[in-house]
């Protein structure tokens, strides 16, 4: 799921995804449980997570085993 950030950056700040100097957000990958607890967090700055789909599926599989 892609989260869009609100104009004032409140959501980015909530997930510690705001950039400390630039007026934009970093790319942060999150896996969140039904209670909104963050189970996995990977801050990639402005880059992409290598093999992002496979990496995230592997993390989910690891958590449910």
Image (cartoon, grey):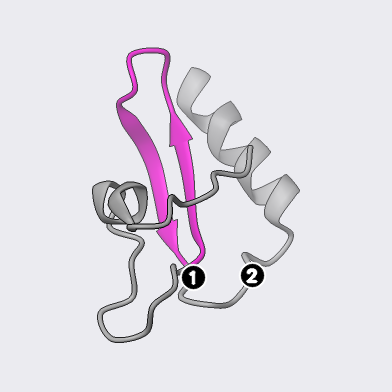
Q: Residue at x 37, y 84 (%)?
A: 22
Outermost residue toward the front? Answer: 7
Q: For the residues marked 2 and 1, what is the alpha-carbon distance in whole angstroms?
A: 6 Å
Q: Position of residue 40 (x, y in %)?
A: 41, 42
Q: Residue at x 66, y 37 (%)?
A: 57
Q: How many marks?
A: 2
Q: Which residue is mark 1?
A: 44
In the foreground, 62 or 41: 41
Q: Position of residue 1 (x, y in %)?
A: 63, 37
**Residue 65 tag number:** none
The magenta-colored residue range is 27-43
- The answer to whether residue 65 is visible is no
Q: Which residue is mark 2?
A: 48
Mark 2 lies on a secondary structure that is loop
In the foreground, 33 or 61: 33
Predominant SS along the magenta part: strand
């Amino acid at each position: 799921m892609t989260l869009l950030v609100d104009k004032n950056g409140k959501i980015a700040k909530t997930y510690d995804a705001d950039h400390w100097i630039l007026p934009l957000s970093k790319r942060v990958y999150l896996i969140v449980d039904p209670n909104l607890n963050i189970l996995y967090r990977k801050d990639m700055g402005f880059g992409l997570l290598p093999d992002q789909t496979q990496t995230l599926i592997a993390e989910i599989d690891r958590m449910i085993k």
